[in-house]
Image (cartoon, helix red, strand yellow):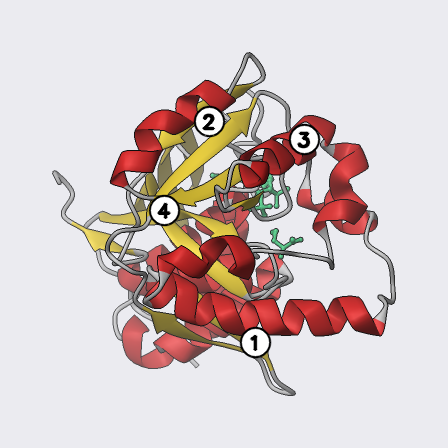
C-alpha cells in the first residue's frame, strides 16, 4: 500500500513550556506557560538535517536521536509512512532538565509538525490519538496535556491511553518561575520516589488536588492550601536542596509555591501585585521570571509570525 503524501511547504509549530504536578497532582495536573519553543519542518527529497538555536544548541544530537525527530518518526509511523527526507529547524527557549516541560514540548512539537506536513494528517491522527501518542513517548501525561491544550489541564490514563481535560485558569493568576543553573533530569528525580506511600499522605493529596481544581479556576485565595504535597516533593528534596528551601521560604510567607514538574525550578502562583515582590527571593542561585499563562497550547503558526 502506498504511504501518505506530504506537503511541499514548510510548517512552523509553536509549543509552550509547562509546569506539571502543581504540588498535589503528581502526574496529573499541568499548567501551560508563556515561554515557547518553535520548530520549522519541511519534507525534503532525502536525508535528515537538524538545525538548533538556543537551549541545547551545544549539546543535542543533530541526527535520529534528536527528540523532535524521534517524535516525528513515531507520528509518521502512525500516519502511514515516513517521508523520504526531513529538514528540522529548532528555536529553543525552554530550559532543559529544569522541570519546565522541555521534553514534552519537543515531543509535542514533533508530533504536531508531522501531522501538519502530512496530507490528511488531521483525520489520520486526531487530537485524542495525538495526546495518547505524546503521553506514550513522554511516559506520563501531565506535561504533554498542558502543552497540547494550553491552560490548566487534568490528565489521567485508562486501560487504553492517556486522556485529558482543559480548564480555564483564573485570570488573576500570575506564574513566576525561579530557574536554577543546574539540571535535574526527570529520570533521576523519578528514581527517588518510593514504590508505595502511606495512606494518610495519599488521602491528603487527594483532598488538596480536588481543592486545587477550584482554587486555580476560580478561587486563587485558596492556592496556598491547595498546593500542599506529600507524595513527591519531600522525597526529591535531596536532589534539589536549594529548591526545597526556596519552596519552604516562599510558603512561609504565604506565597503558594511548588517544585515545578520534576524540578529543580520552583513555581510560585501569585498575582500582579505579588509578582513584582518575588524577585527578592531569587538570591544568587535562581533566575526569577514572571511569565504569562498560555491559553492556546501547541499549534501551527504562520512561518513569519
Ligand atoms: N527541544 C528539545 N530538543 C531535543 N531534545 C530535547 C529538547 N528538550 C528536551 N530535550 C531532551 O529532554 C531532556 C530533558 O528532559 P527531562 O524530562 O529530563 O526534563 P524536562 O522535560 O525539562 O523537565 P520536566 O519533565 O520535569 O518538566 C534533555 O536533556 C534532552 O535530552
Ligand atoms: N509528573 C512528572 C513531571 C515531570 O516530567 C514528575 O514529577 O516526574
Q: Tell whether 158 sits left or right of 38.
A: right
The CA span between labels 1 and 2 is 30 Å
Labels 3, 4: front one: 3
Residue in view at x 34 percent, y 66 percent: 217
Quadrant for ligand 1 reads top right
Q: Earlier in the sequence, mark 1 or mark 4?
A: 4
Picture quadrant of residue 275: top left
Query: At 86% from the left edge and 68% from the top edge, which residue is drawn?
Result: 198
Q: Is mark 2 within 8 Å of ligand 1?
A: yes
- Write down the residue under mark 2: 55
Judging depth in this view, the residue of 262 and 161 nearest the camera is 262
- Residue 178 sits above or below residue 124 on the image: above
Q: What mark, if any, has residue 33 been given in the picture?
A: 4
Q: CA distance from mark 2 to mark 3?
A: 27 Å
Q: Tell which circle, 3 or 1, labels the residue nearer the N-terminal end.
A: 1
Q: Residue 146 in the image: state x and y as whole percent.
A: 42, 60
Amino acid at each position: 500500500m502506498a504511504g501518505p503524501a506530504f506537503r511541499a511547504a514548510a510548517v512552523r509549530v509553536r509549543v509552550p513550556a509547562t509546569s506539571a504536578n502543581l504540588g498535589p497532582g503528581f502526574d496529573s495536573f499541568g499548567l501551560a506557560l508563556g515561554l515557547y519553543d518553535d520548530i520549522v519542518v519541511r519534507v525534503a527529497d532525502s536525508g535528515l538535517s537538524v538545525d538548533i538555536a538556543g537551549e541545547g544548541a551545544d549539546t543535542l544530537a543533530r541526527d535520529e536521536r534528536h527528540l523532535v525527530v524521534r517524535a516525528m518518526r513515531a507520528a509518521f509511523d502512525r500516519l502511514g509512512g515516513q517521508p523520504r527526507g526531513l529538514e528540522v529547524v529548532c528555536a529553543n527557549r525552554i530550559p532543559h532538565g529544569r522541570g519546565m516541560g522541555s521534553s514534552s514540548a519537543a515531543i509535542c512539537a514533533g508530533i504536531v509538525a508531522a501531522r501538519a506536513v502530512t496530507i490528511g494528517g488531521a483525520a489520520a491522527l486526531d487530537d485524542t490519538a495525538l495526546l495518547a501518542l505524546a503521553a506514550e513517548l513522554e511516559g506520563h501525561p501531565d506535561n504533554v496535556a498542558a502543552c497540547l491544550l494550553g491552560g490548566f489541564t487534568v490528565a489521567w490514563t485508562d486501560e487504553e491511553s492517556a486522556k485529558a481535560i482543559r480548564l480555564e485558569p483564573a485570570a488573576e493568576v500570575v506564574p513566576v518561575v525561579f530557574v536554577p543553573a543546574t539540571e535535574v533530569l526527570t529520570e533521576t528525580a523519578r528514581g527517588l520516589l518510593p514504590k508505595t506511600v502511606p495512606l494518610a499522605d495519599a488521602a491528603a493529596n487527594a483532598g488538596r488536588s480536588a481543592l486545587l481544581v477550584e482554587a486555580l479556576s476560580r478561587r486563587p485565595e485558596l492556592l496556598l492550601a491547595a498546593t500542599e504535597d506529600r507524595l513527591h516533593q519531600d522525597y526529591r528534596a535531596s536532589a534539589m536542596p536549594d529548591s526545597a528551601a526556596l519552596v519552604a521560604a516562599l510558603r512561609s510567607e504565604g506565597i503558594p509555591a511548588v517544585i515545578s514538574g520534576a524540578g529543580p525550578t520552583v513555581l510560585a502562583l501569585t498575582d500582579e501585585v505579588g509578582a513584582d515582590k518575588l524577585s527578592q527571593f531569587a538570591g544568587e542561585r535562581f533566575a526569577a521570571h514572571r511569565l504569562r499563562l498560555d491559553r492556546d497550547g501547541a499549534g501551527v503558526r504562520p512561518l513569519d509570525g
